[in-house]
Amino acid sequence: MRILIACDKFKGTLSAAQANAAIANALVNDEVHCQAIADGGEGTAALLGEARQATAQTVAVSGPLGEPVMAQFWLTDNSEPNKRLAIFDMSAASGLQLVTAPDRDPWKASTYGTGQLLLAAQAAGAEEVLVGLGGSATNDGGSGFACALGFQFYDVKDELITDIPNRLLDACKLRAPVALALPQIMALSDVDNPLLGAQGATQTFGAQKGIVPADQAQQEQRLAHLAELTTQCLGSRFEQYTSAGAAGGLGFGLMSFAQASIQSGFDRVATELALDRLVQQVDLVITGEGSLDAQSLDGKGPGALAALAKQHQKPCIALCGRTDNHPALSDHFTQVLPLVSGNAPAPADSAAALTALTSAQRSTWSGWN
């Protein structure tokens, strides 16, 4: 069989490339093509940077809680036919993986370092920028990002507030920098949530960033206050836009403070990697990620790839660490194969487990050719 193996990362366990290789180890008698995928989450910049043969550059920026971190961006060469392009993941500067669970502080966690990373890419010559929005430790609406660009928040006494986002509710005025010229920015999102409301940043993603139920209302109020400030002081209104709630509201911040556009991260990856052509050339598509559930069908890599396979009438199998067996999954995937079920512990060697699972199931796929 001709098989396309195109996994996203198994978060905290295997990279997309490692997962692909583990599955391919069980398919030595098939014609296999491996392609890592991403959807705007962590790993998107590295994947697109490699596809563009861009050069990785490392700079020091402020992490989510103000600690210094080393973050990467990828920059295309001057010989590119279009404008010079920089690509980075916001998680490189403001990601959840940079903060241990006991230290998570959604009141202070800031996207300031993401703004620094953008300015570093611009200083290196970037005329266009792609920003992956997944995996944030923040829920600041991009207010920290704004401060890095030179926006200033003032209190009722017209005194500058330096503790943003912690004192964001004290802000009564927002002033833009006198001269701000930025590259053209495209943000890549794996979700379509607005900034506010039941489907917004706080209520949908807040818990994983450390927002406890008792603080949800005030966190929501803080983002609503930021939205009001941008409308009053900048004349913009992006809180209900698709993906405004991505990355703790950084989608909103990028549109409000940097005139960014937002598109589906998977759609951009699919175009850059020619996934449509790769799917058409095979008999079977295998994809996967660490956790497969109903959210995997809302712009996430495996779900979007399954939709592409279905469009071309190709069977698509999902291998995953765990699944909630949501009924909607069966409408997209021909087969869903988890490594573990229920509350069983994860395998000690996830790569070996993926290889064994693939090997055990391979014979059932022969009739699909």
Image: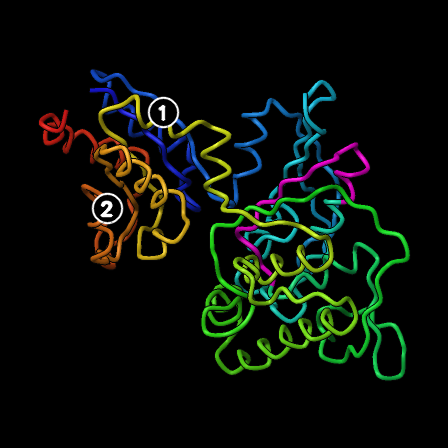
Q: Name the residue rendered at 48%, 32% in the picture.
A: 271
Q: Which residue is mark 1?
A: 278
Inspect the magenta stretch and tell me whether residue 127 lies in it: yes
Q: Residues within 10 Å of mark 1 (few under 14, many from 20)?
A: some
Please give left or right for residue 11 compared with residue 52 in the image.
left
In the displayed structure, 33 sits above or below 144; it is above
Observer-nearest of 20 and 327: 327
Residue 19 x, y percent position in the rendering: 36, 34
Q: Name the residue rendered at 25%, 46% in the picture.
A: 332
In the displayed structure, 33 sits above or below 193; it is above
Q: Name the residue rendered at 44%, 27% in the picture.
A: 274
Residue type, mark 2 in image:
Pro
Foreground disc of the pair 1, 2:
1
In the displayed structure, 305 sits above or below 110; it is above
Residue 295 x, y percent position in the rendering: 36, 56
For marks 1 and 2, give the CA distance.
Answer: 25 Å
Magenta range: 119-138
- Kindly indicate the quadrant of the structure image that contains residue 102: bottom right
Numbered mark located on residue 338 in the image: 2
Observer-nearest of 177 and 36: 177
